Amino acid sequence: MKTLLTTIIAIATLTIGFATTTPPAKLIATAAIEIAAVNVEGHELFESASYNVEEENIEFTTVENVDMIQIFNAEGNLEFQLPVMSNQVSISKALFSQGESQLGFIMSGKAEVFMTSVNMK
């Protein structure tokens, strides 16, 4: 009985461990850019995400309105804070340097900033 209980606890612990270390799903993955939600909650905010090659814009449609977008450089320093007030967001690729950065989405009525990782290739 004690062995069975120990086994169940071990399996539950491993399951929780794997669940919390699952890498976030990519929102956009092209030859030019990769964007992924930093956490699962952030991934659920997006109805769609795409990269418009002709206009070189990153385009998002969110479930709720976005009040502000924050762009952070590789060191985590705030570069831009842009008002949006819509659920449709278009951001020029020119605002990002090559390499890693982050986008913060400040949603209407939410205290938390939802982060995405951005990798410009």
Image (spheres, rainbow, N blue to C red):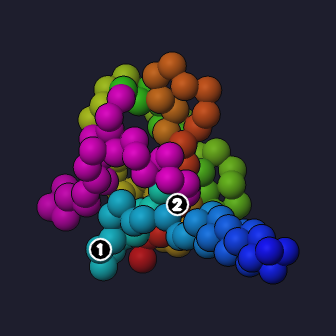
Tag 2, which secondary structure? strand
Please report whichever mark, 1 or 2, sits nearer to the chain's N-terminal start: 1
Residue at 53% across, 70% down? 23
Q: Look at 36% across and 29% down and name the residue there.
A: 64
Q: Is residue 51 visible?
A: yes
Could one spot residue 116 in this view of the protein? no
Query: Outermost residue, right direction?
Result: 2
Tell me the CA gap for discs 1 and 2: 14 Å
Q: Is residue 18 left or right of residue 50?
A: right
Q: According to the image, label 2 marks what residue?
A: 117
Residue 78 painted magenta: no
Q: Nearer the viewer, residue 66 or 109?
A: 109
- Relative height, residue 87 to residue 115 (above, below): above
Q: Which mark is residue 40?
A: none
Mark 1, Cα crowd under 10 Å, few <14 / some 14-19 / many 20+, is: few
Q: Is residue 66 left or right of residue 97?
A: left
Q: Amino acid at mark 1?
A: Thr
Q: Toward the viewer: 26 or 54?
A: 26
Question: What x and y, as percent, mark residue 66?
Answer: 41, 30
Q: Position of residue 65 (x, y in %)?
A: 36, 26
Give the position of the C terminus as an image quadrant. Answer: bottom left
- Please state the extent of the stretch shown in magenta in the rendering: 38-64
Residue at the outermost top position: 109
Per the image, the residue denoted by label 1 is 30
Q: How many marks?
A: 2
